Amino acid sequence: MAAITAALLFPKYKNTPVKYFIYFLWYVFIIECIGGYTVYVHRLDSLSHIKEYLSTTWMRSNNWWYTITWTIGSALFYAFYFTKLIINKSFKIILKYLSFIFIIFSIISIAAQWDAFFTTNLIGISLCSTILIIISILFYLIEILKSEKILNFYRSVNVYISLSILLWTVIIAPLVFFSMYFNKEDWSYVCTRTIILFFANVFLYSCFTVGFIVSKPENEE
């Protein structure tokens, strides 16, 4: 819904940094479609032979895919995106250095936990990803609070984006520390986690959709 709305309104934002966020929404859609391969092979009888093959390879779980494309990828994108929005040079430099450090840390963590990389979420990377996202958003919000833009904040799509991502991150981040309970032996946690993720995602992408519709273009490049 958010990606389609953004695509339809692309001409409205094509000369602003928001265009990068629109690309990112479609990137998320694509990685979700690809990442669902574990579900496809389990539910489709016609892919049963592939299921048997995957069960013996490192692709039996999609944790590796989401660690690279989402946990690492989304944090780096948000740092890049908010760097495009903020004016403060010190904030820009800090985000660039933090992004570089995050990349190095992620590579080292994956190399040091190679087997776990394919079977579970790497808590260290998830925690650093969350910190980088929160810092990126806070830098942007601090700058907004110190400028005249705060007077018309409700017409800025970037305010909708930043506040909704911040709240979503705060809600979802704790789930990473309980990922060990996400298994067939603890269905109560599986159901609880699924419900939290569902409503958090509905909230997040609804905010994006509303923001695209009601906002005015700003920060033209």
Image: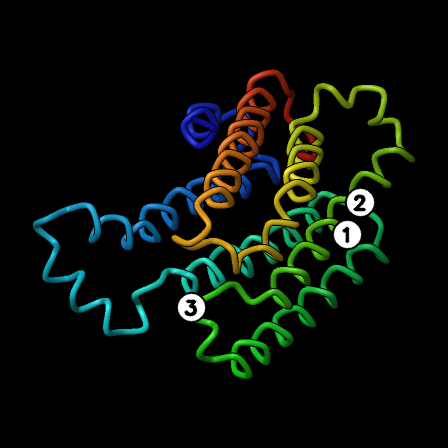
x and y percentages locating residue 197 in the rendered image: 52, 38
Q: Residue at left 43%, top 47%?
A: 27
- Would you name the residue on which mark 2 appears? 138
Query: Is 218 or 145 nearer to us in this picture?
Result: 145
* Residue at horizontal 47 percent and vertical 65 percent from the top: 120
Q: CA distance from mark 3 to mark 2?
A: 33 Å
Label at residue 119: 3
Labels 1 and 3: the sequence-earlier one: 3
Q: Amino acid at mark 1?
A: Ile
Q: Quick check: 81 above or below 49? A: above
Q: Secondary structure at mark 2?
A: helix
> Which residue position holds label 1?
135
Q: Is 183 left or right of 41, judged from the image as shown?
A: right
User: Disc 1 and disc 2: Cα gap in Å?
Assistant: 5 Å
- Could you tell me residue 56's position as x and y percent? 23, 73
Cβ atoms at labels 1 and 2 below 8 Å apart: yes
